[in-house]
Image (cartoon, coloured by chain):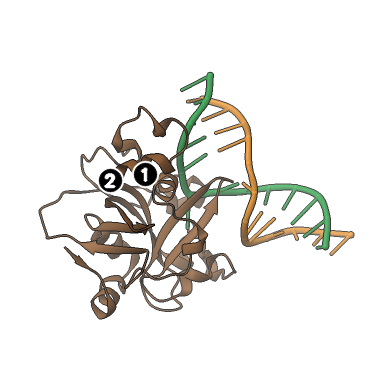
Chain colours: A brown, B orange, C green
Amino acid sequence: MSKLADRAGLVFFAVDAATLAQRLIGTRLVRLLDGERISGVIVETEAYLGVEDKAAHTYGGRRTARNEAMYGPPGTCYVYFTYGMHHCLNVVCGAVDEPVAVLIRALEPTEGLVTMRRLRTGAAKRSHPDTALCSGPGKICQALAIDRKLNGTSLIGGANLWLEERDPRPITLGNSARIGVAYAESWSDRPLRWYLSGNPNISVVPRK
DNA sequence: TGCGTGATATTCT
DNA sequence: GAATATCACGCAG
């Protein structure tokens, strides 16, 4: 297990979104909160392909205060708020000024589960299984206390949020259309979502 | 299965 | 400036 930093980190993130989406599966997302490690293994991601992708916030080259982070260097976090109540965490990849990113959709909780449960609201606080703690982009941000303060910060050598690579081990990737992007016309069916096949922590059971 | 909720982009005056 | 439409979801029921 090694923390991604500096040059190695940059190389890791400086790829296209589809590649990074697959590469992120199985790595560990670590949040340091009041000195406590809270972490989970990434089990579900989606690629957003920038200016050409109708489902992306940067479709057509839109560049605003909100999505500015997507134009930053690879390894930057893009955190935004949606539906009036949910934050979502993305990892910027590609090159500077190329607004492509990967949405982190689900984690398998590994450290700090008690804290995660405390941070989560509603039903997940009590009787629900651990697999419900981080099984969705909004849930991850709640469980890891991620909000827009982290927007624009870098995962490379990050002080409070970073990625760790695990020893390679055989995994089986599943691949499907993205979730919640029905409005994106022909882009809504593109198989740009990846997940750890059979993992109970993924957000929605893949449709065929 | 519906619907809340509020930031943001877009579209007006 | 201000009104409005829209949304990478989660939860109650």
The residue sitting at 40% across, 70% down in the picture is A76
Crowd tier of the residue under label 1, counting other residues whose Cα lies within 10 Å: few below 14, some 14–19, many 20 or above:
many
Q: Chain of mark 1?
A: A
Say whether marks 2 and 1 touch (CB < 8 Å): yes
Residue beneath label 2, please?
A: A109
Q: Nearer the viewer, residue A80 or A48?
A: A80
Chain for numbered disc 2: A
| Residue at 43% across, 30% down | A123
Can you see residue A134?
Answer: no
> In the rendered image, is residue A183 in sight?
yes
Q: Quadrant of residue A49?
A: bottom left
Give me the residue at 43% from left, 50% from top. A141
In-image side of A62 versus A76 (left or right): right
Q: Quadrant of residue A118?
A: top left
Q: How many marks?
A: 2
**Residue A1 on image: x %, y %:** 16, 62
Answer with left or right where residue A131 lies relative to residue A188. Answer: left
On the image, numbered disc 1 is attached to which residue?
A116
* Residue A27 occupies quadrant: bottom left
> Looking at numbered disc 2 in the image, what kind of residue is underneath it?
Pro
**Nearer to us in this view, A154 or A195:** A154
Query: In the visual, does A5 lie left or right of A204?
Result: left
Farthest residue, direction front: A35
